[in-house]
Structure formats: C-alpha cells, structure tokens
Image (spheres, grey):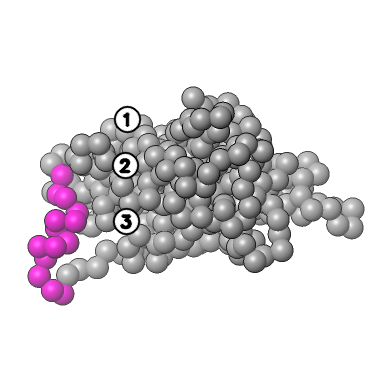
Amino acid sequence: MKGLTDIPGIRVGHSSDYEAITGCTAILCEAGAVGGVDIRGSASGAEETGTLHPLHITDRVHGILLAGGSAFGLEAASGVRRYLAGRGVGFAFGGQHIPIVPAAILFDLGIGRADVHPGLAMGAAAAAAATDGPAEEGCVGAGTGATVGKILGIGCAMKAGIGSATVRMGGGVLVAALAAVNAVGDVRDPETGEIVAGARKSPESREFLDTEAEMLRREPPARAAAPHNTTLAVVATNARLTKVQATKLAQLASLGMARTIFPVNTMADGDTMFALSLGDREADINALGVAAARAVAQSILRAVRLARTLGGVPGLG
C-alpha cells in the first residue's frame, strides 16, 4: 500500500530543510476534490479553510498544504497555488486559473532555526516534487521538525514526523490518511495502550513520564503547556461525497487522533483534520468514518515509529 497516494488523483510531495529543521508537504488533487475540515485544537493556524465549509460556494479544492514554521509557514501555500496555476489548474477567469489550496501549519520553531520558515519557494518545490508513488514518511516535509511529548519542554520530547496508511473496504472503496504529528501529548498504540513515543522523565532518560498522569498529579496552579503544538492530517477516499459528508468524514477521522494521542485537542494544540473525496464509489458515511479513524491512527503510529533522531531530539526510526 502507498498510503495517501493509493487514492487515484492524489499526488504528494515534500520539501525539507534539514539545517533549519522545517519543511512543508503538498497534497495535490488537480482534477478537483470535494473537501471538508474539522479543527478541534485551540491553537490552530490555517488559511482558506472557509472554502471547505458546506455553505461556501466553492465546490472543490485543488490541493492541501501542510507546513512547519508556525504562522510564517502559511506563505508556502502561495507557492503551491502558483505551481498549480502554471499548470492550468483551478477555476478559470480572465485567461488565468485560480487554484483553491487550504493550508494549515504546525509549530516547529523550537527544534531548529526559528528564523527560517517554509515560504513561497519551498511550497512550489513541494508541489513540483509531488508524485503518485508511495508517500514518503518519517522526518520529511511538514514532519521535518515535528516532535511529541513536550509537557516538560523540547529537552524531554521525542522526534515525530509524517506517517501514512490505507484501509480497504468492500466494493473497492479505499480510505487513506497522512498525518504530521507534533503533539504536546504522548502517542500510544491503541491495541496495547502502551506509550510508543512521548515525554521522557529527563533529557537523559528513555523512561516515559506519562503526560496525562503528570497533568493529573500536579497541584494547582499547574504549569500550562505552551501553544507550540499541532497534529495535522488529511484523509481521502475514492467514494463520492457531498461537502456535508466530507465535513462529517473529517469529524469521524479525528477519532483516530483521540485513539492515539494523549491528551489530544488541548488548548496547546491546533489539531486539524482535512477530508477529500475523489471518485465515484458508493459507500456509507458511517463505515467510511470507521475506516478513516483507523487510517489516521495507523498514520500517527507510523509517524513516530519512522522518525529518526534529529536536532538532538531522539527518534525511533
């Protein structure tokens, strides 16, 4: 399985800066896709997500951009738009094309260089690198500077990155996901409940702290985690959906985050889930939601298991 690119019509490309430890990921659907979004974190950074609302007149999007760099990283979306417009992708007007590319960012300024961020050139490079081959995973693209388990700060955190997975359903229906994992919490395997990656008890330790337990045992006033976190994910299917159904798919897919990240959707996370529908297969939205949550959970596990040590932050890959 190739991950997100198992869905016909989707291409994925990354651009990574390993000196600054940041990057961005372009998910292209040039023929257009029906989209939806679900933002459950309280520290999100995004643009053009309004076009995904069921009441918005725009009936399709042409790409999604995920980026590091905090708010500065949103500039990379313009690079994706320019790349697509140059290929004649988007809504035609006045001899030009206007591609719709919603974007969301994560905070990775604490691991590499805080003064270097994904911009227009990096966004265009990620789009130009997009292929329908297996989605590259680990410390690439938007996951280059991603980390998890930061309740004690970056010194006790662990490296994360990007992961992707696909779930097959009956009737040839596919649901695939790609996640860039940058959570304040720990990542647990839902099958065992064991922490896979997360906060360590000290910078020298490989023993897990257990972020939720630490939060509960602290006496008020507990130190609040800095709003420097966000897990970004895209789930896609070859089933035909309306914008209302795509929005619901994004909501149901978010359960995959809840099954693997502890805690999740906090005031310090900007967790954002995009959903894309390409194709004409028939499927029940509830069944699609079950598959989407599973694909997201698998993607999150892969994101931490395939992440290598980088910037002094230990990884498992």
Specify whether 71 is left or right of 151: right
Query: Mark 3 and mark 2 in contact (Cβ < 8 Å)?
Result: no
- Rate crowding at label 2 as few (under 14), some (14 to 19) or many (20 or more) other CA atoms within 10 Å: many
Compared to residue 282, the image places residue 56 above or below, namely below
Place of residue 255 in the rendered image (x, y in percent of width and height, measured from the top left): 38, 50
Q: Amino acid at mark 3?
A: Val
- Any part of residue 246 in sight: yes
Is residue 18 visible in this depiction of the protein? Answer: no
The local crowd at label 1, few if under 14, some if 14 to 19, many if 20 or more residues have their Cα within 10 Å, is some
Q: Quadrant of residue 219?
A: bottom left
- According to the picture, the residue beneath numbered tag 2 turns out to be 159
Drawn side of residue 70 relative to residue 127, left or right: left
Q: Which numbered marker is on residue 317?
A: 1
Q: Which residues are magenta?
A: 208-221
Q: Disc 1 vs disc 2: Cβ atoms closer than 8 Å?
A: yes
Q: Is residue 50 above or below residue 253?
A: below
